[in-house]
Amino acid sequence: MIESSHLRAAIVAMATTVSAHAEELTALDSAIGDGDHGANMKRGFDAVAADIDTIGAKPLAEALKAVGTKLVMTVGGASGPLYGTLFLTLGKELAANPEAYVAAYRKAIDAVAARGKSEINQKTLLDVLYPVADALEAGRSKADVVEVARAAVAGTKDRKAIRGRASFLGDRSIGHVDPGARSSLLLIEAVAGVLP
Ligand code: ADP
Ligand code: MG
């Protein structure tokens, strides 16, 4: 069972890793976007971490919704509404079906895809989030799931961007890792590090 205490630890871990990798995310976004992904993500997760006492006091589903709301308000860019939708939907689904974590994750990423009008293999964060859903549903180990996510990030490099700012570059987006895919991996690694 996942508890609010795990979420507290996950928030700290996510904020820490996003902060530590903000420059890397910015460099990736400078190559095929506008160079703000590191700052966007750091602003968002710093804001979530600053609110940790309020968020951590809530039941898990409500806490996840609060994280989503905070991210929508603070991250900005294209990624803010998308990551916000991910956490908001996770919370909404777990409120309806507590402990159906994998099903909630699948619904959450489908909501992200709907919000972004996007799908897998368009060189976005979905290129990581979807293979992770498949691995979770297949009952793969935590280490395997993280490995799947790492490989998925690397896989974005040779892909042409079809959604988001990078798509404006057309073929020139090929040869660069997608910043949102990279930040998704950071979050997945952080969560995997604190879950039982
Ligand atoms: P912006 O592109 O507005 O500057 P960010 O730099 O914070 O926003 O985020 C860029 C990332 O958001 C991309 O690397 C990509 O992974 C993701 N992204 C952008 N548009 C979409 C979309 N329509 N669907 C899914 N992901 C998207
Ligand atoms: Mg950007």
Image (tube, rainbow, N blue to C red):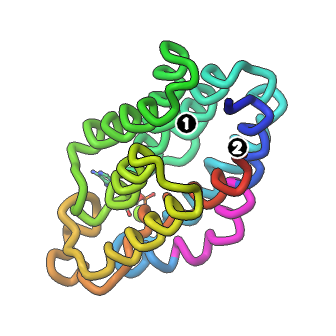
Magenta span dominant secondary structure = helix
Tell me where residue 134 appears, x and y as whole percent.
35, 50
Mark 1 CB near ligand 1 (8 Å cut): no
Q: Is 96 placed above or below 72 here? A: above
Q: Is 32 placed above or below 93 here? A: below
Q: Are marks 1 and 2 in contact (CB under 8 Å)?
A: yes
> Residue 140 — which label?
none
Asked if the stretch drawn in magenta spans residue 25, the answer is: yes
Identify the amino acid type marked 2.
Answer: Ala
Asked if the stretch drawn in magenta spans residue 106, the answer is: no
Q: Secondary structure at mark 2?
A: helix
**Residue that carries the numbered disc 1 in the rendered image:** 73
Report the span colored magenta.
Answer: 14-26
118 relative to 98 in the view: left or right: left
Tell me where residue 1 appears, x and y as whole percent.
68, 30
**Residue that carries the numbered disc 2 in the rendered image:** 47
